[in-house]
Amino acid sequence: MKKFLSCVIVAVVFIACGEKEQGEANKALALHNDFVAQKQSEEVVALQQRANASGYKLITAPQLEEAQEAIIIATLPRGIYNLGLIEGAKHFEFAKSITFNDNGSEWNWDKDALGRDKSEFVEFLGEDKGAMIVFYDEGEDIFAPFGSAHTALIWARHLGYENLYRLVGGFGAWKGLGLPITTQMPECCVNPHAKDSHASEHKH
């Protein structure tokens, strides 16, 4: 009986987690669709205002799929690879909100980048400050937290990069639209969005 109850509990937790993930993906896809339809929802307006104020642009999933030279950086939490990545994306995890120093000032790299080295981030971005660089996260964080992609974009802008984009709806929208993903571990410095990549693709 105890074994049966344990199995039931595990099953319920698994279903609940799956429903939460699906709910977040639906939210991200809805944001993407509202943006494409130019529907001025509260989320779309907030996303646009933040992008304008922070010096970066917004890009939709189909637009990114057509981009030939984009450097793509996923700011998703560690261990997310088994859920898939956009093919060719590099991975550099960031906090979901900008962290302030004890004196109230900004630019707390260690906490924003969760202890990862800044030189590695700069290597990912490359030497060309005008290159097209796209950041994406799960896609559901718009208000507080603003999302890890926003944190990364703030830092990239601070480091002098100018042609920066945030993927509207993030990975949730990309996956919800059935665009190709890979479950292979991302590599450091390969051409980030080459069409001839041999990474395995899956349709979801």
Image (cartoon, helix red, strand yellow):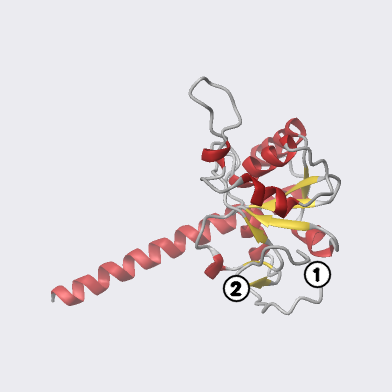
- Which of the 4 image quadrants contains residue 163? top right
Q: Secondary structure at mark 2?
A: loop
**Amino acid at pointer 1:** Ala
Q: Secondary structure at mark 1?
A: loop
The residue singled out by tag 1 in the image is 194
Q: Position of residue 149 (x, y in %)?
A: 64, 47
Left or right: residue 202 versus residue 7 is right
On screen, 25 above or below 57? below
Q: Residue furthest left?
A: 1
Q: Residue at (19%, 71%) from the top-left corner?
A: 5
Which residue is depicted at the point 68% across and 70% down?
178
The quarter of the image holding the N terminus is bottom left
Q: Which residue in the protein does label 2 denote? A: 183
Asked which quadrant contains residue 51, the reply is top right
Q: Residues within 10 Å of mark 1 (few under 14, many from 20)?
A: some
Of residue 190 and residue 98, the one placed in the foreground of this image is: 190
Q: Position of residue 11 (x, y in %)?
A: 32, 71
How many numbered marks appear? 2
- The residue lying toward the viewer, choosing from 58 and 101, is 101
